[in-house]
Amino acid sequence: YLAFSAVCTHEGCTVNHTKGSNEFSCPCHGARFDTTTGDATRGPARRALAKYTVTVSGSDIYLA
Ligand code: FES
């Protein structure tokens, strides 16, 4: 499992994910981020989304 912050690294808007897409997109200025790495794939954001470590216990997922 992967967990990323939804806070865009450009100016802090909340990024969205469209089902079937491999990118998160920011509605404010159009930045895109790879859903497997969090890396910025389209500006104006340059830095990756913050990545969190998660643990799985049964059917629950926890931030580590
Ligand atoms: Fe996300 Fe500007 S705040 S692209």
Image: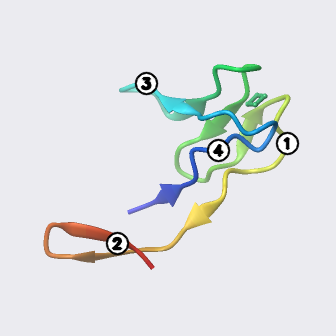
How far apart marks 2 and 4 lie (CA) works out to 19 Å
Taking the image as shown, residue 58 lies to the left or right of residue 16, namely left
Q: Which of marks 2 and 4 is nearer the N terminus?
A: 4
The disc placed on residue 7 is: 4
Q: Earlier in the sequence, mark 3 or mark 2?
A: 3
Question: In the image, what residue type sits under mark 2?
Answer: Tyr
Taking the image as shown, residue 10 lies to the left or right of residue 23, namely right
Question: In the image, what residue type sits under mark 3?
Answer: Thr
Label 4's element?
loop
Q: Earlier in the sequence, mark 3 or mark 4?
A: 4
How far apart marks 1 and 4 lie (CA) works out to 13 Å
Question: In the image, what residue type sits under mark 4?
Answer: Val
Taking the image as shown, residue 64 lies to the left or right of residue 48, namely left
Question: In the image, what residue type sits under mark 1?
Answer: Arg
Mark closer to the observer (3, 4): 4
What is the quadrant of the C terminus in the image?
bottom left
Q: Which of marks 1 and 2 is nearer the N terminus?
A: 1
**Residue 23: percent from left, percent from top:** 55, 33
The residue tagged 2 is 62
